[in-house]
Image: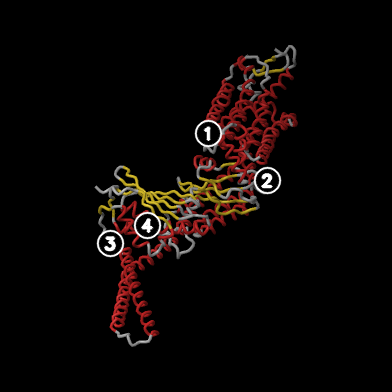
């Protein structure tokens, strides 16, 4: 067997194979242990079992020149000795090979693949490179086992083993697989710990062999073997402890601001003022984490946009608002996870998907390194923009997790603050409504008092006129006669104005009284005529044309006359104000205001169109038009903002109809009302 080489060379080769197999035993063990940690899986008992197996195989490897493990070597390729399992077929080595290099590694790969399938974004890329690199390294390792089964393939595939750390290093740099500093520290600690764990017994066996033989005799090798068993058992625990202590020192600043953010998130819900709350969020984030800037965008239902509420830092925000259909908004709503700029940029470069081009462009305009979505259960409220860290470090997974916790607490605090603001606004609206209700209640009594005064004035004027008519003015001088005629004419004018004032009061009483809640058959002319009787005292009918573009035989509608007169009063009043605004603002030659009424039967409803050529509404006001107390008029004297809100309620709730509108700024407004036809 050893005709060409001495026994000492054979023993030396066996020794180094034992050294190599010490690493081969622990490579799959630590790889699987790392996978469990990387995927945040709790496998406490499984970890204990595989470490116990590793210790058993390690002891077998070093017991009595590996009698029950490696057992024998054979000389192959005319160059070196290799494991020869086929000769003695040792059971322990076969168990080691199957348990660690097939069962354990296959289980670890399956865990990675299982985590890969539902993953997305940067996490998906991390797992992809991890899986590819691990399989490449596993193929290289498997090639070294083939000669043990007398499949003599030259170990060229050892090159694959070297590729594994290169692939992982690439993933670390490009896809932030882990913090570089932490990774290097862990690797250094691992090398240092296992250099001591394996090196001390080897040094003991090599340098103190003679001394051990003198003391222990032929069983001298039991001393280094026992020491190796003890150190190998303690090695994982030493590594974990030292690694944890080192990481705590390296990540002390990160842990500090993460704890600060956690504590700050808890206290945010007590802040009721929304602006103060948002300022606090950006202040805490920029100062604690030390980032270039932070901003908060929140959803506004009136405009269907996400609007910048607050920003802090040195960057100028290029996007003050984003529409709800923006691809970046859709991505955040669907993924419900942080969006990282580097990830969007990589995806844009690696794929032709236009979505990532939009993501990259929007984040670049926002100067955002990370976007954190704000969700309250399933309600997407907005997002937080985070700039780069001033230190130049990356945002770790722990960072992103803490920011998501912060965003969740912020969502609750924002809702509380918004609810508080809405409650205050509602209280103000209720107070305003109560004032208007009081005025409405007073109107009847005031009208009665005014009518009494008008009646008294009419009597006085009439009596005075009768007295003048009974006077004998033949003997009066021309000057006196002229004075009496002037007084008589003035009294006539007083009487005429008293009568007109009485009609105005009647109109006010008719308008302010609720009337009977009865619905009857009404013609459109009947509604318009009743409205004009009232509105002519507020608007100047001769300043615009009112057109009735409908036939006289259109069907009657089912409605309440008083309520519908209120609706059309508001239409004409608002249209008149818009016409006056256009005339005074644009100063167009030949412009004359026009309000047109037209109709179109639609099944069981009559469509009534009220159209004017006034100033129209700006785009940002279109979605607010039916909001209570919203007005485009320049002062409270012109409008309270309740008119169109009340109209909407009368038409939709009271008459079971519908109302819609469209408006073009500086062109005009068109309201479309559908009312049920009377049957």
- Please tell me whether residue 628 is drawn above or below residue 70 in the rendered image: below
Residue situated in front as seen by the camera: 391 or 398: 391
In the drawing, what numbered circle is on residue 454?
A: none
Mark 2 vs mark 3, foreground winner is 3
Front: mark 1 or 2: 2
Measured in 3D between alpha carbons, the distance from the residue under mark 3 to the one under mark 1, in whole angstroms, is 70 Å
- Frontmost of labels 4 and 2 is 4
Q: Going from the N terminus, do you reach mark 3 or mark 1 first?
A: 1
Toward which corner of the image does residue 540 lie, by quadrant?
bottom left
Give the residue at mark 2: 392
Tag 4: Cα neighbours inside 10 Å, few (<14), some, or many (≥20)?
A: some
Q: CA distance from mark 1 to mark 4?
A: 56 Å
Under circle 1, the secondary element is helix
Q: CA distance from mark 2 to mark 3?
A: 73 Å
Can you tell which of label 3 and label 1 is closer to the viewer?
Answer: 3
Image mark for residue 115: 1
What percent of the width, then of the height, locates residue 178? 62, 39
The image position of residue 144, as x and y in percent, is: 64, 21
**Foreground: 88 or 315?**
315
Quick one: 370 or 195, which is closer to the camera?
370
Mark toward the viewer: 4 or 3:
3
Kindly identify which residue carries mark 4: 646
Label 1 and label 2: CA atoms lie apart by: 30 Å
Q: Who is closer to the viewer here, 186 or 62? A: 186
Measured along the vertical axis of the image, is residue 508 above or below residue 403? below
Q: Vertically, is 377 above or below 176? A: below
Residue 403 appears in the figure: yes
């Amino acid at each position: 067997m050893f005709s060409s080489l001495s026994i000492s060379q054979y023993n030396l080769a066996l020794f180094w194979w034992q050294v190599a197999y010490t690493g081969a035993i622990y490579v799959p063990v630590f790889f699987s242990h790392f996978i469990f940690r990387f995927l945040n899986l709790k496998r406490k008992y499984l970890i204990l079992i595989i470490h116990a197996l590793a210790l058993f195989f390690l002891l077998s490897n070093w017991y009595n020149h590996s009698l029950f493990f490696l057992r024998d070597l054979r000389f192959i390729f005319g160059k070196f000795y290799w494991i020869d399992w086929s000769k003695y077929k040792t059971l322990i080595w076969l168990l080691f090979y199957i348990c660690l290099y097939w069962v354990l590694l296959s289980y670890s790969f399956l865990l990675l693949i299982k985590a890969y399938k539902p993953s997305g974004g940067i996490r998906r890329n991390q797992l992809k490179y991890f899986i590819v690199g691990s399989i490449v390294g596993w193929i290289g390792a498997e090639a070294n086992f083939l000669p043990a089964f007398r499949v003599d393939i030259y170990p060229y595939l050892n090159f694959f083993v070297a590729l594994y750390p290169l692939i992982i290093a690439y993933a670390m740099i490009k896809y932030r697989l882990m913090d570089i500093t932490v990774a290097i520290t862990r690797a250094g600690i691992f090398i240092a710990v296992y250099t001591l764990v394996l090196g001390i017994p080897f040094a003991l066996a090599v340098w103190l062999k003679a001394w051990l033989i003198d003391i222990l005799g032929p069983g001298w090798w039991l001393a280094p073997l026992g020491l190796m068993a003890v150190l190998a058992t303690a090695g994982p625990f030493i590594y974990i402890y030292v690694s944890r202590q080192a990481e705590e020192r390296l990540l002390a600043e990160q842990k500090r601001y993460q704890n600060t953010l956690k504590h700050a998130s808890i206290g945010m819900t007590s802040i009721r003022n929304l602006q103060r709350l948002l300022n606090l969020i950006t202040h805490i984030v920029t100062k604690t984490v030390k980032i270039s800037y932070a901003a908060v965008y929140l959803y506004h239902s009136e405009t269907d946009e996400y609007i910048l509420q607050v920003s802090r830092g040195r960057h100028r925000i290029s996007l003050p608002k984003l529409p709800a259909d923006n691809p970046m908004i859709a991505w955040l709503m669907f993924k419900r996870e942080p969006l990282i700029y580097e990830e969007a940029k990589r995806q844009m470069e690696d794929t032709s998907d236009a979505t990532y081009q939009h993501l990259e462009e929007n984040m670049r305009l926002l100067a955002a390194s990370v976007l954190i979505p704000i969700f309250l259960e399933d309600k997407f409220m907005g997002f937080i923009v985070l700039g780069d860290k001033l230190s130049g470090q990356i945002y770790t997974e722990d960072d992103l997790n803490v920011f998501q916790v912060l965003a969740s607490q912020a969502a609750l605090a924002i809702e509380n603050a918004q609810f508080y603001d809405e409650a205050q606004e509602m209280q103000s609206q209720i107070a305003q409504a109560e004032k208007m209700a009081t005025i409405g209640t007073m109107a009847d009594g005031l009208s009665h008092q005014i009518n009494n005064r008008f009646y008294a004035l009419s009597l006085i004027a009439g009596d005075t006129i009768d007295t003048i008519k009974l006077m004998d003015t033949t003997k009066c001088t021309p000057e006196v006669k002229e004075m009496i005629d002037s007084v008589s004419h003035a009294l006539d004018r007083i009487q005429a104005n008293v009568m007109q004032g009485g009609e105005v009061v009647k109109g006010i009483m008719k308008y302010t009284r609720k009337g009977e809640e009865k619905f009857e058959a009404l013609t459109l002319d009947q509604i318009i005529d009743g409205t004009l009787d009232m509105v002519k005292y507020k608007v100047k009918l001769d300043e615009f044309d009112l057109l009735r573009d409908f036939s006289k035989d259109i069907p009657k509608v089912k409605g309440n006359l008083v309520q519908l007169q209120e609706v059309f009063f508001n239409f004409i009043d608002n249209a008149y104000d818009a016409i006056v605004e256009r005339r005074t603002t644009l100063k167009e030659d030949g412009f004359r205001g026009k309000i047109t009424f037209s109709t179109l039967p639609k099944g069981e409803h009559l469509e009534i169109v009220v159209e004017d050529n006034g100033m129209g509404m700006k785009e940002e006001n279109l979605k607010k038009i039916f909001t209570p107390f919203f007005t485009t008029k320049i002062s409270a004297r012109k409008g309270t903002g309740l008119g169109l809100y009340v109209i909407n309620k009368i038409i939709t709730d009271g008459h079971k109809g519908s109302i819609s509108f469209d408006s073009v700024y500086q062109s005009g407004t068109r309201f479309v009302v559908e009312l049920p036809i009377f049957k």
